[in-house]
Image (cartoon, grey):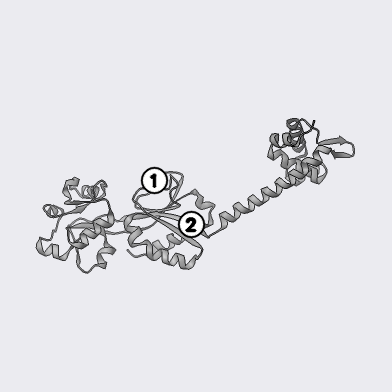
Amino acid sequence: MFSIQKCIAAMNWELLKIFGAVYESGSLSAGAKLLGSSQPTVGRNIDQLESQLGIVLFERSREGLAPTDAAHEIASYAKQLGNITDQISLLSTGLAEAVGGTVRITASQMVATFVLPEILKRLFEEQTSLDVELVSSNQVDNLLRREADIALRMVRPTQNELIAKKVNEIPIGVFAHKDYLTKHSTPSNPEDLVGHRIVGYDQADMIIRGFKDFGMEVSKDFFTLRTDDQVASWMAVETGVGIGFGPRFLGKRNGDLVEIDPGAKLPPLPIWLVTHRELQTSKRIRTVFDFLSDELSQINF
């Protein structure tokens, strides 16, 4: 005995789509043309659906196909499901094309604090339906864990799942408060830094590697104050705790800071704008990614 519940449970939805095309068009050839397929393929699909359901959907004769009572009953459900499929397709397209909504951005503490606020102000003025969640973090794996949509990083990611674009470089300098230098000598070469109070990182080895690049081996014991909080480190330099390392554009903002030339050029920090491959399908993320790229590339650090 025919059961519509059994039919629905057993249906292959792709075969149902093919059934609907044949039912509406009235023949295998017309259904194949509607689907962009061949008549033999469509015929095999109808046979497969009838076999799965254990019922006859079309009576075949010289005059063509005649839908059975079961086919008429199934057709109403097929039409409803087709409408739902169309609505889902439109919804997904709308979500992909919508600019409004929330974008989660992660950036290093220095960039999140001293670079992004001005850029985000202009973004909000241009895209009034956008919200941004800003995560201040020095971790590089946020995107792979899908904890953020866009990241600003100082190292290029190597994962194939990510899209990365280098948008600028931040020159790095050596700075100290003028009051500190008044009480202590001003170093003129890397060796002169020994004996000074040096502000550096705790776990991060970026500065240690920088010293190694110009031939000076140091350990983290070289630093009098150690913190991996970049903003705290910089504020310590501005307060006069000791000699520290930071973006030159920040050092120039404070008239009480003196840039020291230790006789070795520090390499600039690259800015990489990174996102996952959803950039290719989400207009919202793509819009913010492109906006950040344009803004960051124009800054004269």
> Is residue 96 rendered to the left or right of residue 84?
left
Q: Secondary structure at mark 1?
A: loop
Q: Amino acid at mark 1?
A: Asp
State whether residue 185 is above or below residue 79: below
Q: Amino acid at mark 2?
A: Thr
Which quadrant, please, contains the C terminus?
Answer: bottom left
Q: Secondary structure at mark 2?
A: strand
Residue that label 1 marks: 141
> Is residue 237 rendered to the left or right of residue 119?
left
Which quadrant, please, contains the N terminus?
Answer: top right
* 1 or 2: tag closer to the N-terminus: 2
Q: Position of residue 142 (x, y in %)?
A: 40, 47
Residue 280 is tagged as none
The quarter of the picture where residue 81 lies is: top right
Residue that label 2 marks: 102
Mark 1 Cα shell of 10 Å, populated few (<14), some (14-19), many (≥20): few
Judged from this view, the residue extending furthest toward the right is 63
Q: Nearer the viewer, mark 1 or mark 2?
A: 2
State whether residue 111 is above or below residue 41: below
Most foreground residue, 291 or 171:
291
Q: Position of residue 139 (x, y in %)?
A: 35, 48
Mark 2 Cα shell of 10 Å, populated few (<14), some (14-19), many (≥20): some
CB under 8 Å between discs 1 and 2:
no
- Give the Cα separation between the discs numbered 1 and 2: 20 Å
